[in-house]
Amino acid sequence: MEKKEEKDTPKGESTQRQDRLGLALSGGGFRASFFHIGVLAQMARLGLLRHVEVISTVSGGSIVGALYYLHVKRLLEAKSDEEVTDQDYAAIIERIEQDFLRGVQKNLRMRTFLNPFKTLRMALANYSRSDRIGELYDEHFYRPVFDPNRTRPIEMRELKIQPKEGKPDFNPLDDNGGRRAKVPILLLNATSLNTGHNWRFEAIRMGEPPREGIIAREIDKNLRLRRPPSYDAITEKQQNIELGLAVAASACVPGLFPPLAVSGLYPDDIRVQLVDGGVHDNQGVGGLLDMGCTRFVVSDSSGQMRDEDQPTTSIPGVLGRANSILMDRVREEELFRLIQHKDAPVAFMHLLRGLSGRAVSWIGPDGKPAEADKKERQPELSSESFGVACEVQDLLSRIRTDLDSFSDVEAYALMYDGYKMSEQEIPKCKAFKELLSGPAPIAPPLCRFLEIAPLMAKPTPAFLQQIKVGGERVLKIFRLSKPAAAVTGIALVGLLFWLWKVLGPTILAQLARQVTIGGLLLSGAILAIGFIPIVSRVFHVFRFLRGPASFIVRFVVRALIPALASIPIAIHLFIFDRLFLKQGTLERLGLSSKAGAGGQGPGIRKN
């Protein structure tokens, strides 16, 4: 007899309960994180955050979503349900705005290679950049909130919220009904490379959510990795899975970070390899539907595919474009699944809202367009209706989806955009009328991003340049500062000249020497080591060499070269990155905010 899979909802409870609000925070790197902070700030002002029962996050949404969840955990465990106010949630957002920006401006992506000892450890099969950035998330974002004095990483099973004065076995799905301040469930979404299925980390369990029904079983014939009911039910090695690693798996962008492995959880030598949750569902709406949510706030700052009048026909270009088309199709299907009609119970914010789409007519026999441009591609309301110039909105949608440093200007512009867009979208949704029918909205959170409002509506050339450069992944400081580019160029020329003076004679002497047998043998050995893993799959006699050869290649590629790069990385972090952040302060644009996230801005509430 086949064992019945567990459901996401508790036994006997209908998934059609009419009062469950879900919040989806999409992927999109730190760009998404900052946009989500703006949406959270508006939800705090409207008094909606205390109603949220499920938070489903992906990639950049997971990074900030986990931070928000930790703050809510601390609040609900410190105050009784009657004591919690909307101002408490506003204070959380005020703190997150500054703490998160401070952490981002340390450039965690580059810091994964800053410590040469950690980098050398990456030669081992059980440690990679994904593990390292998970440690950095824990150190810079999560531990200061969970316990500033803690020295060991936070574990996922420590995240379960036990509300003050709540019963010992409190279950949010069963016991939230009578609470004013709901206890949320956090879903950190990743993707299993083994099966292609969604993988979720929760406070009580992790694994692939079950998909039941005859139709599902007929359509999906891939392996189903059954989800254990709790962390206590699995091997001791994986019971202590860390929050930082779970977030790193959710934000494990393919090509930028290696997959994060979960070993020893299943038999038959199955080693679960996890990558970015956006590969499966970049909006995170699937988790909300599975948990029986009936009202939805969807904050989507993911990268949306752009039109190309003349697409490249090169093989790499076609492959990249095909992948973009597939991801765009998945995004559309997930959203169409959720938003089936105009009055759907969904408040949906995304970075192209308020912008026009193109509609080009064919050329007629007279050589002119057969029809005028179609007006159905115009938005219902322009982005200017919520206080953001169309040019600014377009540039914000092009900001990089990366995990590097973001300047104050970039971060505050994204926060303000999410804040004002949701101010318009959430009250429009009829499904939220009941939740918004209480007391009038509280005063806006005392957030610094509100200071950028004048430039969002009437941008200056300097502000537009800052946001435009934000779309670049490299050399941003040189695009913003001509003096920095000139000084760096002169320094590089001088360095190259000095190196040639010192090493040039030696190099020329080596080139003039005849090729030796020893040199040929050394070159051949280096090439052979690189090809042994491939050759051993065909000629089994070389199989015994596969392990040592793989280790040598892994050591050189993943450890030695990056370790040697730690010096230029340190130079970048402590010189060029700081120059970039200094260029991106509000003071540079004539606004009065104190530069940087490190200061205690005026009006910040004291917790």
Image (cartoon, rainbow, N blue to C red):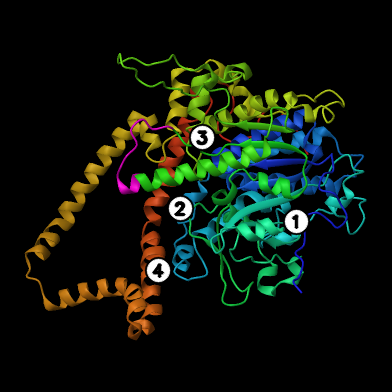
Which structural element holds mark 2? loop
Viewed as shown, does residue 485 lie left or right of 304?
Answer: left
Which numbered disc, 3 or 2, marks the residue closer to the eye?
A: 2
Residue 239 numbered tag: none
Report if the CB atoms under discs 4 and 2 are less than 8 Å apart.
no
Q: Is residue 29 visible?
A: no
Report if the CB atoms under discs 4 and 1 are less than 8 Å apart.
no
**Which residue is depicted at the point 75% across and 24% down?**
427
Which structural element holds mark 4? helix
The Cα–Cα distance between marks 4 and 1, rounded to whole angstroms, is 35 Å
The Cα–Cα distance between marks 3 and 2, rounded to whole angstroms, is 21 Å
Q: Earlier in the sequence, mark 3 or mark 2?
A: 2
Residue behind mark 2 = 256
Residue extending farthest front: 365
Q: Amino acid at mark 1?
A: Leu
Image x and y of residue 230, in percent = 76, 65
Q: Is residue 402 visible?
A: yes
Part of the protein shown in magenta: 307-317
Q: Amino acid at mark 4?
A: Arg
**Which residue is depicted at the point 43% across and 36% down?**
579
Image x and y of residue 319, in percent = 38, 48
Which numbered disc, 2 or 1, marks the residue closer to the eye?
A: 2
The Cα–Cα distance between marks 1 and 3, rounded to whole angstroms, is 31 Å
Q: Amino acid at mark 2?
A: Leu
Q: Earlier in the sequence, mark 2 or mark 1?
A: 1
Residue behind mark 4 = 554
| Relative vertical location of residue 449 with respect to residue 556 in this rendering, above or below | above
Residue behind mark 3 = 407
Residue behind mark 1 = 159
Q: Badge 4 local density, few (<14 within 10 Å), some, or many (20+)?
A: some
Image x and y of residue 160, in percent = 78, 56
The answer to which quarter of the image holds residue 224 is bottom right
